[in-house]
Amino acid sequence: MRKWLLLSAAIAVEVAATLSLRASQDGSAWLVVVVIGYTGAFALMAAVLRAGMPVGVAYGIWGAVGTAVTASLGAVLFGDPFTWPIVIGIALIIAGVLLVEFGSHTKSST
């Protein structure tokens, strides 16, 4: 359970940093949040890996969920495009991550 909480925190911090990067176009003060956010996200991801989550699974989920949330919030907060091709692309990313997750579970030998 701990690794999933850490991964959720890493995703939230990375999304905040990425949205702050977009906001920095209107004011450079946001760059402080960007640097702190990305530093925190990588520190949290290191903790996720130390907690035992496989790197392919952790990075895939981080990337897929981060992409979906960032695209959605970018559309809401900044008026960025959110078209059907973007939705389909996000769905394909999530499907790929699910395949990596399911493939990471090994059969136990009896």
Image (cartoon, helix red, strand yellow):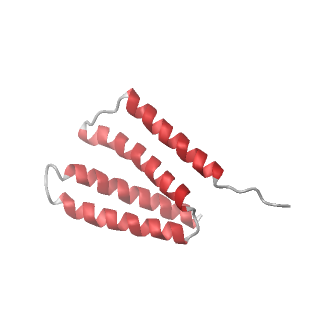
Q: Quadrant of residue 75?
A: top left
Q: Is residue 86 above or below residue 8?
A: above
Residue for point 54% across, 60% down: 4
Residue ranking furthest to the top? 84
Q: Position of residue 47 (x, y in %)?
A: 48, 70
Q: Toward the viewer: 31 or 59?
A: 59
Q: Is residue 96 above or below residue 4?
A: above
Residue ranking furthest to the left? 27
Q: Is residue 88 above or below residue 61?
A: above
Q: Toward the viewer: 38 or 6?
A: 38
Q: Quadrant of residue 108?
A: bottom right
Left or right, 95 with respect to 38, comes to right
Q: Position of residue 15 (x, y in %)?
A: 36, 53
Q: Position of residue 100 (x, y in %)?
A: 58, 49
Residue for point 54% across, 47% down: 97
> Quadrant location of the N terminus?
bottom right
Left or right, 89 with respect to 53, comes to left
Residue for point 49% across, 60% down: 7
Marks counted in the figure total: 0
Q: Position of residue 44 (x, y in %)?
A: 43, 67
Residue for point 38% across, 33% down: 86
> Quadrant location of the C terminus?
bottom right
